[in-house]
Image: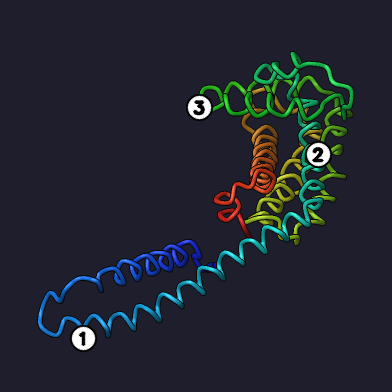
Amino acid sequence: MKYKIDFGKTFMLSVLIILFSRVWTTLGSFPEAFAYGSVVYQCLDIILFVLCNLSIGVAAAIIFYYVQRYAEKKKDFKLYTELRRILLVLLYKHLELLSKIEEFEAINQRDKHKQRILGFDTYDIPKLMSSYNKINSKEQREKFKNNLAKYFKSMSQEQLQNFSNSFQKEINEMKSKEEIRYFKDSDELIDTVFILYTTEFSICIDIYVKNRKELNEFQITEEPLVSDYIQFLDSTIELYKELQKFIDSIERKKIKVFIKMLN
């Protein structure tokens, strides 16, 4: 189990102590409320004075820590844009298939832009995410699976193999960056994409290609091919969304989000 100090609670406690010490100082101007009240007040005032100065030091250290981490992440910003580039290419390759599926037909109604990779560009990603988010019920998920199964069945052996192999370059590039500390749990998300592709989807494609003549449409849907592809797609999108959220927190100075996502 991983343990992480909750600097947020520590910072808030420090601020509360500082505020309370100021209130306590103000109370010193009032008359004694009981016998020897002044003595009690002076003793507690000394304790609060020490705690207040300690809290100021702790709060300042926490602020300095996060400012330093922000500066570090901004300095290494190219690392994040490089991973985003790899993920975008992966998503474009997913779109080569998904744009032919009913649930993602909105992709084909996009505006035309000059710079494009594999026929797609960053302007297609919002439509991909929107279409993906609409598949949010059991019925819609089953319909999506059936449409995928039909399209996989319509593809030739060479097309299936080429589609599967097309992800390999970016998967290897992404895996080589797994040890880089991007954001919280980024290594696990990267590893999940890698595993779902290499040990699930790509292997399943090989098995399906060899045995496709013996499988009917129902079996294609129920067998791992469609399910493995959807898991691979889900993990790719999840990693991209988390990375984009962190990049956005750096670019737009969303400190609260940045702190929560720090590794």
Q: Point out residue 4 in the picture as x, y percentages from the top left corner.
A: 53, 67
* Crowding near the residue tagged with mark 1, few <14, some 14–19, many ≥20 C-alpha atoms within 10 Å: few
Disc 3 marks which amino acid?
Lys
Provide the secondary structure element on which disc 2 rests.
Answer: helix
Q: Is residue 145 visible?
A: no
Quarter of the image for residue 26 reads bottom left
Provide the secondary structure element on which disc 1 rests.
Answer: helix
Q: Which residue is mark 1?
A: 39
Provide the secondary structure element on which disc 3 rests.
Answer: helix
Q: Point out residue 211 in the picture as x, y percentages from the top left corner.
A: 78, 33
In this rendering, the label closer to the viewer, 3 or 1: 1
Q: Which residue is mark 2?
A: 206
Point out the tag, 3 or 2, that comes first from the N-terminus: 3
Disc 2 marks which amino acid?
Asp
Q: Is residue 70 above or below residue 112?
A: below
Measuring 68% from the left and 48% from the top, which residue is drawn there? 250
Q: CA distance from mark 3 to mark 2?
A: 28 Å
Judging depth in this view, the residue of 250 and 223 nearest the camera is 250
Q: Point out residue 197 in the picture as x, y percentages from the top left corner.
A: 75, 44
Left-right relation of 122 to 52: right
Q: Split into 4 quadrants, where in the image is the C terminus? A: bottom right
Point out the tag, 3 or 1, that comes first from the N-terminus: 1
Tag of residue 138: 3
Q: Point out residue 62 in the picture as x, y percentages from the top left corner.
A: 55, 67
